[in-house]
Amino acid sequence: MTFGEFINKYNIQLNEQQLAAVKSVEKPTLILAVPGSGKTRVLITRLGYMIYCLAIEPESILTLTYTVPATMEMKTRFAEMFGQEMAGKLNFRTINGIAAKIINYFSEKSHKEVYNLLDKESDRYRLLAEAYTEAVNSRPTESDLMNLSTRITYIKNMMLSKDEIAVLGEKEDIPIHKIFDIYNKKLRDGFLMDYDDQMIYAINLLKLCKDLLRDFQETYKYICVDEAQDTSKIQHELINMLAGKYRKLFMVGDEDQSIYGFRAAYPEALISFEENYPGANVLLMEENFRSAGEIVKAADRFVSKNTMRHEKHMKATRDMGVDIKTIKVNDRKDQYSHLIEAARQCQMEKYEIEQSRMKKYQTEQSRINGVESGFEEKTMGQKVTAVLYPENECILPVIDRLERMNIPYYVKNNDLTFFSNKVVKDIRDIILFAYDTKNTELFTRIYFKVSTYIGRDYLDRIYRLSKKEDIPILQAALKIPEIPSGSKQSVGKIIRQFENLLKDNGGQAIGRIAGTMGYNDYLQRYKIKTDKIDIIKAIASMEPSAMRVVERLDELAKIISTKKFNKNSNFVLSTIHSSKGLEYDRVFIMDGKDGIFPSKVIARPEKADTESLKEYEEERRLYYVAVTRAKDELVLFTFVNASTFSDELLGLEKADRKPSRSGNTISVKNGLVEKTKTIDISDARYKEKLEEIKRTGKVVHKKLGECKARVIDDRMVELESKTKKIKCDLRVMLKNQLIE
């Protein structure tokens, strides 16, 4: 079949860059495909071109994808275009899948027993927990196990040396090298290998058995790799071994979209492709068919500042579209009311569409069954709004509010590790101890995390006295003569703090624990991130007491783990990582605040060390991926003088980043910066705070401290501190961040 006949028969419509990619078969080829450039369509078309135009045997083509769902989608899309029979002759596999085939083939040919695959996550976690306990002498939390599992995967996929593992352990402040060795010994003792070992095992077999390597190189002369930027170092080594003889390797990826560094993604392989394959073709697919022109232009400007990349520029095929909208907020909590309003709007849009369809069905006098089945399907014509965020925990305060208001939504990630995180467990323990002041188990876990200044050596004596006299533990501490007077003064103060904690509303309680009671000092002392406190406090602000905070955390954990979410909802909540490869009509990007996203700003990349720059540029790539999920509308939350990523996306110079007293927000149109008047505090946020004051009768003022509060009318609030009583405008206080 000629190429022209092929194009006509299968109705193929590709641009020049895409056609060049399809025709590059005989040389090693790297396709750098920007977001929304139709890379999957090109890869599938190329497979058809190889079979029908070049008469290449389909059985000799191996197509590798990153995940099992991606493999299934690729095969399905090929079958839709070229037929099920031909799809059945091609080999679509994950990289782990081809590693498994190599191992099984070796076993069959050599009649030797091979390691069994540890394929259940629960079994892997059990072994990791045993290894952790042996190495650290304490039980890990679920959060610890997830982090440890990720680290083990990283070590094996990056092929780290013992010295490099030790350095990683120092950064993590755990004996990762010791845990790693114990875990691997447990695998060997059980004649087991995990998924990461599977690739190591396959590579070792190929190195040791030349006949095995030859058989696979002869079987798969043509190798195609999708999402190559997500492939790890050891996976690239396996691919290079298989492609080593014939060099007919076709890789599709984009280092600008490499966002899985924590799982050992190795975009360096794309950057060094020409060095590894001299004479290779490096082709670009730069046209974005997904996003409006304003979004494409801003995204390209942003990512072009990265240094670890090939030179390329994304171009829009659509018109410029609407402005990129920004909403200026003072803190993270201000975002939530805007998102609730967006969710309500989505609910209303869906209702209006359903009503319109109902009228249409009634007009056409459709049968009742037809009407019902129509409403079970995804509502046609509705726009989907997505809220994207860097970490799973970022969205918890929004989920909390959506649940309270019974607003429908769909969350893509049912991740519960936040609730087992050590910081969250500490906050729970501190609150529970306030209600159970004789509980020795709780006190043992928290005494050094709040400002008691009691030495561990005194604990047994304190506990015995507490039990003997049936008095609270801290009261018993005051009766131990050997405890220094300075420590006793601290104990007296912390007793009063625990007593006041019982009187606080939820938000005040978390503020007290983190601040006055010294928990933030503990976190900083041990270099533990404090970002979990913000999330807990945002949830706690809706609760009347400290105990209700504990109960609400349990309720949210249960909701997230058991609720059956409607996947057809037009309001979607997703981490940026989980949104990869997807697109939405309208996208909100939240938590784009310096110190959160990005976690650390590097003002002068040329002065940064390599490791810090790699981490920073990965966060930049993550932001870029979030931006390029938007088709029509992009909405950014910007924080006063603290939103480096959004400022760069909008093309603002440093001089333009000064906070505006007028409450202006910035939008971009045709590459120019425009200012439009907006209100910093939304009506929903204002009403939420007003109701909270009515309910609790308290506020924390930044200058006056804790105050009794009385609502005078819809605008004015009376505050009474220990020293004065004043009347204040609530909106002004919120706008100027005078109250929490």
Image (tube, grey):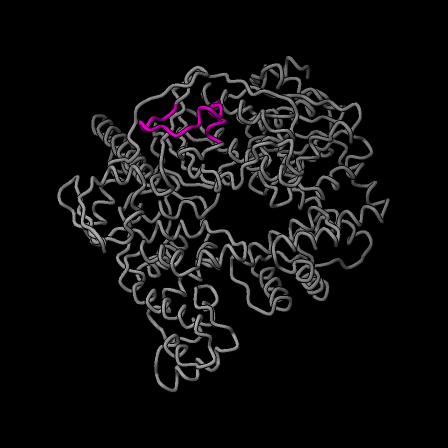
Q: Is residue 714 visible?
A: yes
Q: Quadrant of the N terminus?
A: top right
Residues 687 and 208: in front is 687
Q: Is residue 650 magenta?
A: yes
Q: Is residue 253 left or right of residue 297?
A: right
Residue drawn at (45%, 49%), measured in percent from left and top? 531
Q: Is residue 405 left or right of residue 480?
A: left
As drawn, which residue projects farthest toward the top?
4
Q: Is residue 74 magenta?
A: no
Residue 26: x %, y % from top left:
76, 23
Q: Is residue 319 visible?
A: no
Residue 517: x %, y % from top left:
39, 61
The residue range painted magenta reads 645-666
Looking at the image, residue 267 lies above or below residue 533: above
As drawn, which residue projects farthest toward the left?
713
Looking at the image, residue 547 lies above or below residue 40: below
Residues 655 and 609: in front is 655
Residue drawn at (50%, 73%), measured in percent from left and top? 455
Residues 491 and 420: in front is 491
Residue 649: x %, y % from top left:
49, 26
Residues 168 and 293: in front is 168
Query: Would you identify the image quadrant in which residue 4 lies?
Result: top right
As drawn, which residue projects farthest toward the bottom?
468
Residue drawn at (58%, 60%), measured in percent from left and top? 125
Residue 640: x %, y % from top left:
40, 34
Q: Is residue 737 left or right of residue 272?
A: left
Query: Would you identify the image quadrant in which residue 666 lies?
Result: top left
